[in-house]
Image (cartoon, helix red, strand yellow):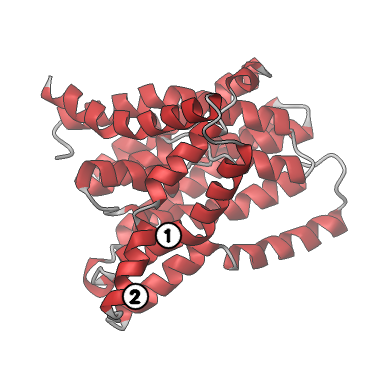
Amino acid sequence: MNSFLFSLNATVPVFALMVLGHFFKRIQLINDNFAANANKFVFKICLPCLVFQDLAGTNIRKNFDLPYVGFCFFSTLASILAIWILAKRCMKDRSEVGAFVQGAYRSSAAILGIALIQNIYGNSGMAPLMIIGSVPLYNIFAVIILTLESNSSQLAGNRSQIRAAFVNILKNPIIIGIALGLLASLVNLRLPEMINKTVNNLAVMTSPLALISIGATFEGRKALAKKKPTAVASFLKLVGLSAIFLPLAVYCGFRDQKLIAIVIMLASPCTPASYIMAKNMDGDDVLASSIVVSTTLFSSITLTFWIFLMKWLELIQ
């Protein structure tokens, strides 16, 4: 019973904010414009501040865990390549392949992952190191796969888009926040108190504002579209990858915050950014939105299960 209550206390408050966001939208307390601007504000300002603050306040020389970052990197890379190969063999529509692949591997690792770990441990814990190992790959391969699997793009355009994608990755606010946080930690930078408090005030807004805006943009009816590929992608995202890589993580000796961060990396719902990218890169945006909605809906059950299982097995505290 204690393990079950632990898992509920970890996940319910997070998903409750998403439900409240949807409720506020239904009663017209907030609208689509608010949600869109809130998402942009969190992505460009709050989340980079949070990642910067957590990394800058950590002795990275002492705490940087290369085997852990390497595990996150190689498990993410293996997941992407395996799903892409299988999708190309089993799916005929090239635009569906791109949306399916990124929907099956791409997690809300930054926003939802940090929210869950903060709710359990009071800080973002190992999430920044997990982000270093996985999120750059999410973005790089999402652009490459959507570009190469597009029905209308030509090879020359593909190369141009891929070059532009790598530039955009370097300009990504989360990547910039990570880079600045790592630099601040390495040189032991200490900001003036007034600046530090300002950064902290922005950082603490990240999780609640992001979760409310996600709930406000939730459109359940879209989950009914393209049921078969949606179901397969959702199963891989929420159950399949975790069933393969979690035992390996345990075998490698990862516990507590490290293991929770890996669960988030593997089993959190697909990020809404995948829909935006599919829509703007000639992919199957209907399938992409369907996977986002389905994984968001069912992750409240599957994430609770994974956390309960780890607590029951005494792998986390």
Give the image quarter of residue 177. bottom left
In the picture, measured across the screen, residue 27 lies left or right of residue 275, that is left
Residue shown at the point (42%, 55%) measured from the top left: 131
Q: Answer whether residue 254 is visible to the viewer in this image.
A: no
Are dots 2 and 1 in contact, CB under 8 Å?
no
How far apart, in angstroms, are the residues tagged by discs 2 and 1? Answer: 25 Å
SS under mark 1 = helix
Q: Amino acid at mark 2?
A: Ile
Q: Amino acid at mark 1?
A: Ile
SS under mark 2 = helix
Q: Answer whether residue 33 is visible to the viewer in this image.
A: yes
Residue at label 2? Answer: 195
In the picture, measured across the screen, residue 311 lies left or right of residue 224, that is left
Question: Badge 2, how many Cα within 10 Å: few under 14, some, many 20+?
Answer: few
Residue shown at the point (61%, 55%) measured from the top left: 140
Which mark is on residue 7? none
In the picture, measured across the screen, residue 117 lies left or right of residue 182, that is left
Expressed as whole percent of the image width and height from the top left, the position of residue 271 reads: 53, 40
Expressed as whole percent of the image width and height from the top left, the position of residue 306 reads: 30, 29
In the rendered view of the protein, which quadrant contains the C terminus?
Answer: top left
Give the image quarter of residue 86. top right
Residue shown at the point (36%, 48%) measured from the top left: 114
Residue shown at the point (88%, 51%) measured from the top left: 154
Expressed as whole percent of the image width and height from the top left, the position of residue 73 reads: 44, 54
Determine whether 268 is above or below 231 in the image.
below
User: So how many labels did they put on this image?
Assistant: 2
Which mark is on residue 132? 1
Expressed as whole percent of the image width and height from the top left, the position of residue 45 reads: 49, 61
